[in-house]
Amino acid sequence: MSKKLISIVVPIFNEEENIFALYQALQSVFKEIALSYNYELILVDDGSKDKSWQLMKELAAFNSCIKILSFSRNFGHQMALTAGYDAARGDAIITIDADLQDPPSVILAMIKEWQKGFYIVYARRITRKDSLLKKFVANVYYRILHLIADVAIPRNVGDFRLIDRAVLNGVQSIRETTCYWRGMIAWTGFAHTFVDFKREQRAGGIPGYTWKKSFKLGIDGITGFSSFPLEIAAYVGFFVIITGSLMLAYITYDAVINAIYYPLFKWLTTIVYIFMGVQFLLMWLIGEYIGRIYMQQKQRPLYLIKEEKGLEKKIHEDNAYSPKNSARDICCSSADRPNTSSSTFE
Ligand code: UDP
Ligand code: MG
């Protein structure tokens, strides 16, 4: 029986200082992997301005297991992951940062968990050596996201993870421009587990993730996986209508029972206040419709199948939104994993 294939995907943006160190660190991991599996290393250059691409070409010339591709410009980390996932042919696909903040040795522990039958193995940070401000902002953000997201996105995990081919097949048909892989992987709902690790400082160079990019990623996470922002108008609307109605009831009681005189502007202010609440409710209603259009246009599969037996036809070909999706294998059981024997790299 041919060996299964492990793909390792590394997004690279201005990492000339780290590429060789990363490759060296991966070497010992490859030696271990090669005992039981074939492997491929996919390096995605996300429009680097330094010598990264040059170094990647040198590595690829030296080792045929290394596949490289380069973007025309910087499309962002998440798109680099998308390209890496598209290029990967492995039965398991591992994504890891290039700056050695994600220790390559953890990969072996991830593969062990995958062998046990887990479809998703997240590398979870138990400590992280980043600036205090970054740690604080990340902590607050992930707490909020955890609270409001419609799917349970695990905390203290980044994009260092292993996914089974079945998981990738489930999400690969989804081509969202505001891509948030952490959310998409969690959305699939396949059995997952964690491998803990200590996150060090980046080995060299400066972070490619500026505050602006991190902010955009954060917004993509919230808007892609939570309907809470749309519901805010409803909460404000109900609050305003309830408090306005109580005010109106009070002044009406005072005027009728206690014969207190309220000038016209006080009546008008109260009524206008209540109508502001009605406006908020109408905004929420419009938001709900727009939200539904937004979710529909994402064209996520309606459901994913883990296993199927005895079915006369492949029902997953009917449950996709578009013909493009139906052409793809949306769901794939472990028994259906693609035969990767043609992609052997010893
Ligand atoms: N990266 C990328 N495109 C970008 C920014 C970053 O491909 O626009 C890569 C980068 O080379 C690294 C990974 O994404 O391999 C994580 O980036 P970084 O270390 O800057 O993020 P941080 O660890 O600070 O969250
Ligand atoms: Mg980093």
Image (cartoon, rainbow, N blue to C red):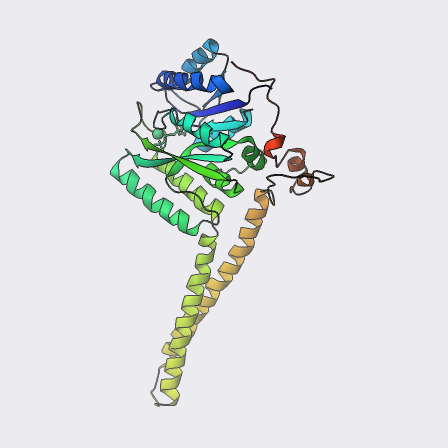
Looking at this view, name the residue that lies furthest to the right: 312
Q: Which of these two is toward me, 100 or 77?
A: 100
Outermost residue toward the top in this view? 62
Q: Is residue 328 visible?
A: yes
- Residue 101, quarter of the rendered image: top left
Q: Taking 10 as reference, is 274 above or below it?
A: below
Q: Residue sitting at 41 percent across and 28 percent down?
A: 109
Name the residue at 37% across, 81% down.
250
- Residue 16 left/right relative to 191: left
Q: How many marks?
A: 0
Q: Residue at x 50, y 20 (%)?
A: 36
Comparing 55 with 264, the one in front is 55
Query: Would residue 185 appear left or right of 147 to someone viewing this image?
Result: right
Classify the position of ligand 2 by quadrant: top left, top right, bottom left or bottom right: top left
- Residues 85 and 104: in front is 104
Note whether residue 268 is visible. Answer: no
Residue 228, horizontal then vertical, whole percent: 45, 54
- x%, y% of residue 222? 44, 46
Left or right, 204 with reference to 280: left
Residue 161, horizontal then vertical, whole percent: 44, 32
Instruction: Find residue 253 and report its image quarter.
Output: bottom left
Q: Estimate the x, y position of residue 216 in percent, counting from the top left.
A: 41, 40
Up/down of 67 relative to 313, above or below: above
Where on the picture, by quarter, is residue 48? top left
Residue with the most extreme left position: 132
Dividing the image into 4 quarters, which one contains the N terminus? top right
